[in-house]
Image (cartoon, rainbow, N blue to C red):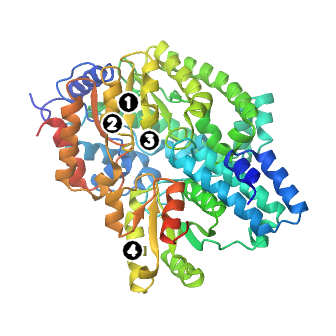
């Protein structure tokens, strides 16, 4: 573990991160070890977010730096760590085309070590079913900004139940009008109020330290 | 005399006076009721949401019918017009019910996010007006059809607005003496933060303020100077009772306090001050949670604002800071309107009344009434405000 890299990542010092990654690479440090240091730094970023020292703009910046650094190592796939914490599938439910929240969550999840499958917006139930069968995620996220889409989320979750997929997957929901009452109504497992909450819930559920 | 026997003119006068007192944070006989609810109301009146797109005059007739059916509602205004031409404001295409969407779906904003990193320099060198003009030419070129649509809207706008007045309804943006707001005189105030965030995309913009803060600020300063001049001229001419002073993407968990002050509040405050200097009130339309930022409104003059959260900000905690300083507008959560029971809605409204209704309070829902709100829940909001 490179403490210098961990610290630079945690402090969002882009130049120092990139410089240290290049230096470690030149010393033939394995890509996986470098990625581990970056993710250690990302963990500190998440902690600072929870402690309200950092906010979403810092989370997004951390993801940006992380992605740039991992590109130097040939991308996350090249580093061989794409599914370190497992797969997370996410989309905005059908009849809703909003994507701001979804994009922030997928960006932050991806840079925190999850293999993210972004289904896009206006996603029909069949696409969630297909993605769960194909990628076997332990956690999925459904985003919505319209109260008129609550019934669609409910229908989607009921279909997962009918298809025998529900017991193996936790369903997280989020978006402007979504609250605890919505969670109960649609039959989801948890409401995430921000991207970091999605990271923390998923890590906890998947047993990641 | 009860409201059923009053003429439209008498009702209009009564509603206008009540609204004026409420926004000035004065005592009222009861809270004025404002329903920002066109998609709900057109259905409650027996039509489809697409009626507001395909036949706006008919759609608005249905809204008026719905308002009358609900009881003595004070405020309600023309529906759907902004959705028909309002995409440019968000750098977006608007998908409309009855066209791209099914009949009873609410219109949706499909953000185009056309702005690149290099475009900051275009804004700095040539102004934001030039940038938006180029955007319009590229994405919304004027055609014979669009010209005709615009002319029809400009003609229909005042006619429909007059129908609301004749039926006794005022709008928050009514001119201070009452009467039809002038076409093309829509006043909106806020920080450049939201325009840039829409133009760039939220993720990219939040990254920009970290990676190239000086460039972003330089562009914001150019935009702000133009915005303030336009805002002052428009408010001075139109003399609206309240000006929609909006914010959202600068709130919630998006920014640290330091960045909020630097990139958002400075500009928001100056825009709000222009509205107030010109004799209007700020209707603070606050999307997202403003819990962390409530105290900032103490920096603006007393009794010149209506604090209007969207159901996400804790209005009661905000009252601990702002009660006596601003009027309040609130704020039944959209989820409660769609999923809750009338008893829950009524109880929440009574809680609002107990806290706020002795003065300066407008009864409403957070942001807008959802199009799929339960009718009995909207009736419960009205009943609570009327003391039934």
Q: Are marks 3 and 2 in contact (CB under 8 Å)?
A: no
Q: CA distance from mark 1 to mark 3?
A: 13 Å
* Residue nearest the viewer, comparing B38 with A176: A176
Q: Earlier in the sequence, mark 2 or mark 1?
A: 1
State the residue at coordinates (75%, 72%): A77
Asked if residue B118 shows in the view, the reply is yes
Q: Are marks 2 and 4 in contact (CB under 8 Å)?
A: no
Circle 2 SS class: helix
Residue A197 image point, x, y percent: 49, 57
Task: Name the image quarter holding residue A29.
Answer: bottom right
Circle 1 SS class: strand
Circle 3 SS class: loop
Q: CA distance from mark 2 to mark 1?
A: 9 Å
Is there one chain holding both mark 3 and mark 2?
A: yes
Instruction: Say which mark, if any, is on residue A155.
Output: 4
Circle 4 SS class: helix
Q: Earlier in the sequence, mark 1 or mark 3?
A: 3
Q: Read off the residue under disc 2.
A: B315
Task: Name the image quarter holding residue B335.
Answer: bottom left
Is there one chain holding both mark 1 and mark 3?
A: yes
Q: Are marks 4 and 3 in contact (CB under 8 Å)?
A: no
Q: CA distance from mark 3 to mark 2?
A: 10 Å
Q: CA distance from mark 1 to mark 4?
A: 37 Å
Residue B133 image point, x, y percent: 71, 37
Task: Name the image quarter holding residue B307.
Answer: top left
Q: Read off the residue under disc 1.
A: B307
Residue A56 image point, x, y percent: 58, 47
- Image quadrant occupied by the N terminus of chain B: top left
Q: Are marks 2 and 1 in contact (CB under 8 Å)?
A: yes
């Amino acid at each position: 573990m490179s403490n210098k890299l961990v610290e630079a990542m945690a402090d969002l010092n882009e130049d120092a991160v990139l410089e240290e990654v290049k230096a470690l690479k030149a010393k033939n440090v394995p890509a996986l070890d470098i990625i581990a240091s970056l993710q250690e730094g990302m963990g500190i970023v998440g902690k600072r977010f929870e402690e309200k020292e950092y906010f979403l703009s810092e989370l997004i910046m951390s993801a940006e730096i992380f992605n740039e650094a991992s590109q130097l190592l040939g991308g996350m796939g090249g580093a061989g760590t794409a599914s370190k914490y497992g797969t997370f599938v996410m989309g905005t439910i059908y009849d809703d085309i909003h994507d701001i929240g979804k994009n922030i969550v997928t960006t932050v999840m991806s840079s925190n070590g999850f293999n993210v499958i972004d289904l896009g917006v206006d996603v029909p139930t069949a696409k969630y079913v297909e993605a769960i069968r194909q990628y076997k995620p332990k956690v999925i996220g459904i985003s919505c900004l319209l109260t008129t889409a609550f019934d669609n989320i409910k229908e989607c979750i009921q279909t997962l139940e009918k298809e025998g997929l529900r017991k193996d997957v936790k369903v997280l929901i989020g978006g402007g009008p979504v609250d605890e009452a919505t969670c109960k109504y649609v039959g989801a497992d948890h409401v995430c109020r921000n991207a970091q909450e999605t990271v923390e819930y998923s890590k906890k559920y998947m047993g990641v330290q | 005399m009860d409201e059923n026997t009053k003429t439209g003119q008498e009702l209009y006068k009564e509603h206008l006076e009540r609204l004026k007192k409420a926004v000035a944070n004065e005592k009222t006989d009861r809270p004025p009721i404002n329903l920002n609810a066109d998609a709900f109301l057109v259905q409650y009146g027996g039509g489809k949401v697409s009626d507001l797109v395909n036949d706006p005059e008919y759609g608005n007739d249905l809204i008026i019918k719905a308002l009358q059916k609900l009881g003595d509602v004070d405020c309600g205004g023309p529906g759907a017009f902004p959705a028909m031409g309002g995409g440019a404001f968000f750098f977006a295409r608007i998908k409309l019910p009855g066209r791209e969407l099914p009949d009873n779906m609410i219109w949706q904003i499909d953000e185009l996010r056309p702005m690149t990193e290099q475009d900051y320099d275009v804004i700095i060198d040539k102004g934001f007006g030039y940038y938006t003009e180029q955007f319009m030419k590229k994405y919304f070129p004027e055609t014979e059809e669009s010209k005709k649509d615009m002319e029809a809207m400009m003609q229909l706008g005042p006619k429909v607005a007059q129908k609301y007045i004749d039926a006794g309804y005022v709008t928050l943006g009514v001119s201070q003496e009452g009467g039809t707001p002038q076409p093309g005189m829509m006043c909106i105030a806020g920080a450049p933060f939201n325009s840039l965030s829409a133009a760039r995309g939220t993720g990219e913009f939040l990254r920009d303020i970290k990676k190239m803060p000086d460039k972003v600020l330089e562009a914001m300063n150019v935009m702000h100077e133009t915005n303030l001049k336009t805002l002052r001229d428009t408010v001075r001419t139109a003399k609206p009772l309240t000006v929609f002073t909006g914010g959202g993407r600068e709130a919630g968990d998006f920014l640290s306090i330091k960045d909020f002050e630097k990139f958002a509040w400075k500009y928001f405050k100056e825009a709000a001050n222009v509205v107030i200097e010109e004799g209007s009130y700020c209707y603070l339309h606050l999307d997202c949670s403003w819990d962390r930022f409530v105290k900032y409104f103490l920096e603006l003059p007393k009794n010149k604002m209506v604090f209007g959260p969207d159901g996400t900000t804790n209005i009661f905690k905000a009252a601990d800071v702002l009660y006596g300083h601003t009027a309040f507008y609130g704020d039944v959560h959209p989820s409660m309107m769609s999923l809750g029971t009338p008893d829950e809605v009524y109880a929440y409204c009574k809680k609002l009344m107990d806290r706020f209704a002795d003065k300066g309070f407008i009864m409403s829902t957070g942001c807008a009434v959802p199009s799929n709100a339960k009718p009995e829940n909207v009736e419960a909001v009205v009943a609570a405000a009327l003391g039934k």
